[in-house]
Image (cartoon, rainbow, N blue to C red):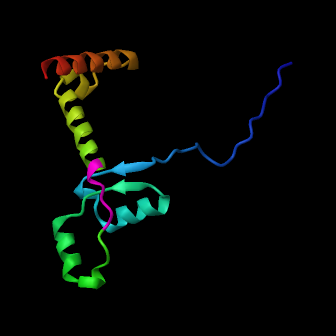
Amino acid sequence: MLEKIRVPRLGTGRPRKKPDSLAADKAYSNGPCRDYLRRRGIRHTIPEKTDSQAARQRKGSRGGRPPGFDEERYKKRNTVERAINRLKQYRAIATRYDKRGYVFLGTVTAAAVVIWLRT
């Protein structure tokens, strides 16, 4: 007779992993987004919008200090985003025609090689 092996659960639901850091564009520079990331302990690199920067500076010392921003991390984000946009120029990658993962990976690899050879 087969016995069921019980594995103890540490919590309810499926386990989730949170990212170590996040790099986003100016659309996510609002207070609630930044507060949420701070609450969860996720480091973030988000540039401040120029109008909110001007409003903060108008307030003087009451405006608070500017949010932290790491230019080097943001440059790396831009590099990755440009690479993804180049890959999306290939229709099979942009629309994900391939159903199987290994076939899609091959398509992405072939497109990456073509991009690499042309540059």
Q: Quadrant of residue 110?
A: top left
29 vs 9: above or below: below
| Majority secondary structure in the magenta region | loop
Q: Quadrant of residue 58?
A: bottom left
In what quadrant of the picture does the N terminus appear? top right
Q: Is residue 70 magenta?
A: yes
1 vs 10: above or below: above
Q: Nearer the viewer, residue 71 or 28?
A: 71
Q: Quadrant of residue 79?
A: top left
Residue at the image position 30 percent from the left and 55 percent from the top: 70
Residue at the image position 28 percent from the left and 58 percent from the top: 28
Residue 25 in the image: state x and y as whole percent: 25, 53
Residue 69 in the image: state x and y as whole percent: 30, 59
Q: Is 109 left or right of 37, judged from the image as shown?
A: left
Q: Which residues are magenta?
A: 67-72
117 vs 15: above or below: above
Residue at the image position 29 percent from the left and 65 percent from the top: 30
Residue at the image position 26 percent from the left and 53 percent from the top: 71
Residue projecting furthest to the right: 1
Residue 20 in the image: state x and y as whole percent: 45, 48
Residue projecting furthest to the left: 118
Q: Is residue 60 magenta?
A: no
Q: Is 80 left or right of 100, judged from the image as shown?
A: left
Q: Nearer the viewer, residue 64 or 9?
A: 64
16 vs 60: above or below: above
In what quadrant of the picture does the C terminus appear? top left
**So how many labels did they put on this image?**
0
